[in-house]
Image (cartoon, grey):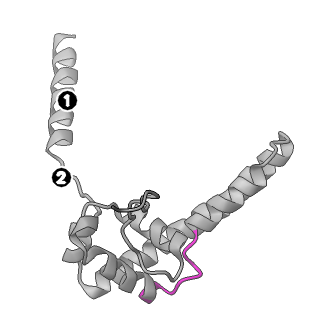
Amino acid sequence: MNKFAAGVVLGFLLSCGFGLAAQTLDHNGLFWNQLGDSAKQGYVDGYSDAMSVSVGKLDNLIVAADLFRWKGAKKIIHQLSRELAISDQRPEDVVKRLNELYSDRKYSELDLGSAVELLTMRGGQPVEAPTAPASSTPAH
């Protein structure tokens, strides 16, 4: 029994050690800029496929919302499906716009998923940094 307990403890310690030593990947602008053109295209294609599957799963939420008479669900689910879908944009355009976005250093830490969502919400508009609202008091 002591050997079994020692084996369990050793296995736990080894799995914790391997877990801590595992390399984490930050999928942000720094990661994006290191990819080649074909890898960028593949990333966007994979992201698009994953989002298409996710949007398809939203149909289950619509059925559940109807079943539980959740008011406003269709509006929320429609908005969510619009934000997830990038099918209305060509992958080449998404790659180009991500290249433009990540060419600005201030966006280098922005997660790729968030960047694609930002580009999707903006449609064909260029991505600009938010600016502070102009002061309503006149300058003297």
Residue 115 position within the rendered picture, expressed as x and y whole percent measured from the top left: 40, 67
In the picture, measured across the screen, residue 8 lies left or right of residue 54, that is: left
Depth check: 1 or 18 in front?
A: 18
Q: Residue 135 sits in which quadrant?
A: bottom left
Sequence-earlier tag: 2 or 1: 1
Name the residue type under label 2.
Gln
| Mark in front: 2 vs 1 | 2
Task: Give the residues in magenta.
Answer: 85-92
Residue 23's tag is: 2
Name the residue type under label 1.
Gly
Report which residue position mark 1 lands on.
11
Give SS at disc 1. helix
Q: Image point 39% across, 73% down: which residue?
A: 128
Image quadrant containing the N terminus = top left
Neighbor class of circle 1 (other Cα within 10 Å; few <14, some 14-19, many 20+) is few
Q: Is residue 105 something that shows in the picture?
A: yes
Q: Is 87 covered by the magenta stretch?
A: yes
Neighbor class of circle 2 (other Cα within 10 Å; few <14, some 14-19, many 20+) is few
Residue 108 position within the rendered picture, expressed as x and y whole percent measured from the top left: 24, 66
